[in-house]
Amino acid sequence: MPEVLTAPLVVEFPFTRSLGPVQSAFLTGLRERTVLGVTASDGRVVVPPTEYDPVTAEEIRELVEVGTGGTVTTWAWNPAPRRGQPLTTPFAWVLVRLDGADTALLHALDAPGPDAVRTGMRVRVRWAAQRTGAITDIACFERDDGPAGDGRPVAHSGEFADPVTGITTPARLDYTYSPGRAQSRYLRALSGHRTVGERCPSCRKVYVPPRGACPTCGVATDTQVEVGPRGTVTTFCIVNIKARNLDIEVPYVYAHIALDGADLALHARIGGIAYDQVRMGLRVEPVWAEDGRFPDHYRPTGEPDADYDSYKELI
């Protein structure tokens, strides 16, 4: 049995949001080395501040300034920091109840080892050298051997010069993808400029890409069937927003293509034709990239368009 393929995969996108008055004041305050909380309806001071009361769900706006020192309420040691985490050396994740607050803030604690961390220890904010109005303006927490603050929050207007009104947070997921035996066979065939599906022994449908089992009958599909290479556009969309790290000029067309002999449409980019000339029923064929392991795109074959009745069940 050939080895199942694996490959590293990264899913990444920038998450952009606008800020309301509470979050704007909180992040702008961090830029100015000030930590703000908000007073809830039951009198508790919530840090980080929320825009709505955690008990009544009503909007809350009463901002207060709390201390930059606090107490660790719980913690967990991180022996192997990952990309993008606050520190590059082993550290502790801690929940810190800042002086004057009634809830805890999650952040990193710089400590030489887990033996140096304990619940109830005193810590203080270590500010980042360059601050932009983000939670990373708190570089981390560090041990504080000084006296505790008076613990009384002070009313604050929440007004700062040049307030932060929006943030962009990169979201990234790194993992190893394994396509399984059926799709490993499919990918190996593609590297040889062949497209292989699998036939269900019950309903006789051919699935491309193969899934290892028939989604209709639920039985294993282990009989390989070569399909295509030509096919028919069943439906499509015009892409007008350029994707990051994708060197394709917009607008371009992505389409569902029913390869000849297949009973499931796959999706691929359409090239070699103006985007506004692509249509349902268009006959296409694969174009392989130089030394590529998969088709770069599909282009028109020049054949007459397929009759609608021949692909309507695959839309």
Image: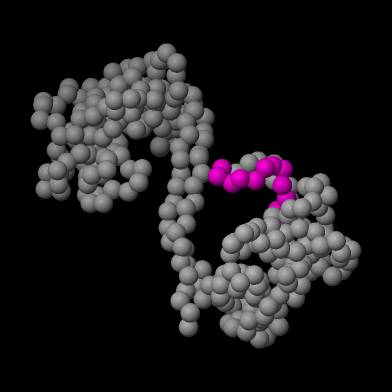
The answer to whether residue 97 of the structure is visible from this angle is no
| Residue 254 sits inside the magenta stretch | yes
**Does 275 appear above or below 306?**
above
| Residue 186 sits inside the magenta stretch | no
The answer to whether residue 208 of the structure is visible from this angle is yes
| Residue 133 percent across, percent down from the top left | 39, 26
Q: Residue at x 47, y 74 (%)?
A: 4
Between 140 and 9, the residue placed more toward the observer is 9
Q: Residue at x 12, y 44 (%)?
A: 116
Between 40 and 103, the residue placed more toward the observer is 103
* Screen quadrant of the C terminus: bottom right
Q: Residue at x 11, y 48 (%)?
A: 115
| Residues drawn in magenta | 244-255
Between 68 and 1, the residue placed more toward the observer is 1
Figure label count: 0
| Residue 302 percent across, percent down from the top left | 85, 61
| Residue 209 percent across, percent down from the top left | 63, 70
